[in-house]
Image (tube, grey):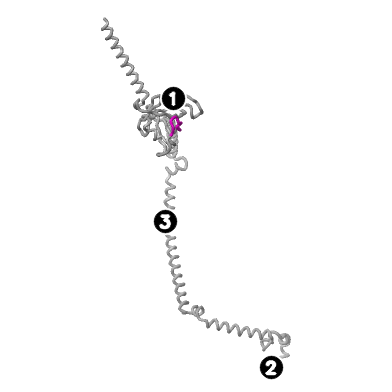
Amino acid sequence: MKNTIGVRWGNLRVGILLTIVIILLFWASLMGGGTSIFHTKAKFVCYFKNINGLLTGSPVWLAGVEIGNVKSIEFVNLDSLRQIKVTCNVRKAIWHMLTVGTKVQLGTIGLIGDKYVEILPGSVGGTVIKEWDVVPTHDPGDVNSMFAAGEEALDKAGNLVANLDTVLFRMKEGEGTLGQLAVNDELYVKLTTLSANLSLLVKDLQGNQERLVGSIERMSRSITDLTDQVNENRGTLGKIITDPQLYDNLAASTAKLDSIMYKINMAEGSMGMLVNDTALYVEVTDLMIRVNNLISDIQKNPRKYFKFSVF
């Protein structure tokens, strides 16, 4: 009887030990987050406004690799953005990658799958953060916001399609300017005529332009020929510009004319007397009076001066 009881107690101890081991392994699977329970871990803290279903034990990823897990989640309600405190375990072996500037954000496995914490590392070679430091969060937007934005975009697209359908219907009925353009070809005919007239106008302008360019070229050649003649001392203009004789003649003539005018002003010579002496003017005036009187008397009494006899 004693041996039988001893065997049963031994089996019971083995069962209890196995149960404890299974419980420990199950706890390790929950708390290890895909990492070994034998890995040394360090902790950091981050705050979120909304964790959207993140659970204790959810994985912590870095560059798509699971490096830890969420240790605890608790309400703190520090302010409007820091309502939930999340403590994360991360393997010590990769802690050196968590430098100043590191941020965390919530990710989703698939479109509506489980949540996880994703680490966005800072600059390489920077100062490593300390354990229990608060890591800032980066909010990329949640799925609900994406769905809400998508629904809003679909509503706007539906309204746009409805408005477009209304516009097309009115165009088909010939309403408004667009409707007239769609159903009435009068504007097309006028535009075609205008295009033809513009083509003719452009053609005429091109012809006038060619004639104008030809005139300018001919004038340019004439100016060039004239310049060549002047430079070569040919022609009247060339003589005037390059031959000093004309200038000398003009200077001499001017000097002589100046001398004559001086003599006239000084009452020298006949011309000077005519200009400066009034006696001749008086005599000429008196003579003209007597001549006028004589002519008047002749007109009144022609027989006094002229006698006519037939026989």
Q: CA distance from mark 2 to mark 3?
A: 95 Å
Q: Amino acid at mark 1?
A: Ile
The answer to whether residue 238 is left or right of residue 306 is left
Answer yes or no: is residue 288 visible: no
Answer yes or no: is residue 93 visible: yes
Q: Which residue is mark 2?
A: 309
Q: Which residue is mark 1?
A: 73
Q: Is residue 151 above or below residue 249?
A: above
Residue lying at 29% horizontally and 11% vertically, measured from the top left: 10
- Tell me which segment is drawn in magenta: 129-136
Residue lying at 47% horizontally and 79% vertically, measured from the top left: 235
- Which labelled disc corresponds to residue 199? 3
Q: Residue furthest top?
A: 1
Q: Quadrant of the N terminus?
A: top left
Q: CA distance from mark 3 to mark 1?
A: 79 Å
- Name the magenta segment's main secondary structure: loop
Image quadrant assignment for residue 268: bottom right
Q: Amino acid at mark 3?
A: Ser
Which is more N-terminal, label 1 or label 3? 1
